[in-house]
Amino acid sequence: MTNIEVNPWNLPGFDMKKPIIIAGPCSAETETQTLATAKLVAAQGIKIFRAGIWKPRTRPGAFEGVGTAGLPWLQKVKKETGLFVGTEVASAQHVFEALKYGIDIIWVGARTTANPFAVQEIADALRGADLPVLVKNPVNPDIDLWIGAIERISQAGITQLAAIHRGFSTYAKSDYRNHPQWLIPMELRRRLPQIPIITDPSHISGKRSLLAEVSQQAMDLNFDGLIIESHCNPDEAWSDAKQQIHPDQLQSMLRSLTYRNPNIVNVPRTELDDLRLRIDDIDNQLIDLLRDRMQISKQIGLYKQANNITILQTRRYNEVIRDRNEKAGRKGLNEAFVSRVFESIHEESVLQQSLVMNSKGNTH
């Protein structure tokens, strides 16, 4: 087990009792918007306010945050509301600026966690600092990369640590913006039980309708808190509007969650429960992949209809079954079982192609 010292967050008057709730807008857009949202968040009894100052965006031209100009706004939030304030950093310079303006909490973003050189520069800039540092999981599902980033921050002398589970990118289409892949933060909890885990349902969901579901799952797993994007006018947010909610809606959602007692003697959580949850997570991914496969089958049906090709292509079918069986054997799977699975998949694929072609008026 990795030797990482973890201490409670040194935030005067803050109670680390679960669940830890961090809330605020994706981005600090203007001083007025930042202060208005902070006052609404404070009115809900939440103690930690988040706001993006530097926003790494996938493509150029998108709003990338107001930068250092927004840090005095967070200072004003602290002065006028008493909230602790936090933001994401992606470079050593961001760390220096955040510390200069008295930011209480910082976290390393998912894109940055994926780059050990960047994490090390941030860790070096943090030496001698005394504040909570949170580390988001990397964009791709790589738990060793996640742990490595936490280790780098720890080796810089930071003991007020936590991990943020914000989901993982996946090629397959999903209901989620970033698939939660719960088995990965569960494995982090197994390997680093001393590290608090805070789930980010906003970035996992990508839309408001899934926030409660993801938040409840995190609470059921006995994770330590939630970091949720909340905006005074979410529909007009300059970034990630669809996943942000008004602070009043946030409070209503938090009240709707069931907070379970992990210490009930008669109903202990067992290894079997964790294994079953891992199976549920994998099954959900299988369902997403099967949906994608059938969508491609429909596209094949359209192509065959346009080119007057019959649905059943026996040689292709035989090649598929043979190839999948060989791969199954190499991976230690029962070939007869895999044959049955792919026979069922092929049968449904043929049906989907037939439905598409018949809907276009084709009758082979």
Image (cartoon, rainbow, N blue to C red):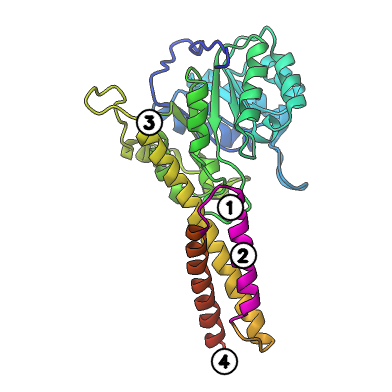
Q: Alpha carbon of mark 4 to alpha carbon of mark 3: how far?
A: 53 Å
Task: Assign the magenta stretch its main secondary structure.
Answer: helix
Magenta stretch, residue numbers: 312-335
Q: In the visual, does 213 lie left or right of 244?
A: left
Do tag 1 and tag 4 residues touch (Cβ < 8 Å)? no
Mark 4 or 3, nearer chain start = 3
Residue behind mark 4: 364
Marks 2, 4: nearer the viewer: 2
- Residue denoted by label 2: 322
Who is closer to the viewer here, 110 or 24? 110
Q: Kindly identify which residue carries mark 3.
A: 271
Q: Position of residue 285 (x, y in %)?
A: 51, 51
Identify the mark nearer the N-term, 2 or 3: 3
Of the residues under marks 2 and 4, which one precedes in the sequence? Answer: 2
Could you tell me the amino acid type at mark 1? Gly
Q: Position of residue 105 (x, y in %)?
A: 58, 20
Q: Which residue is mark 1?
A: 329
- Label 3: state its secondary structure: helix
Between 186 and 343, the one nearer to me in the picture: 343
Q: Residue at x 55, y 58 (%)?
A: 289
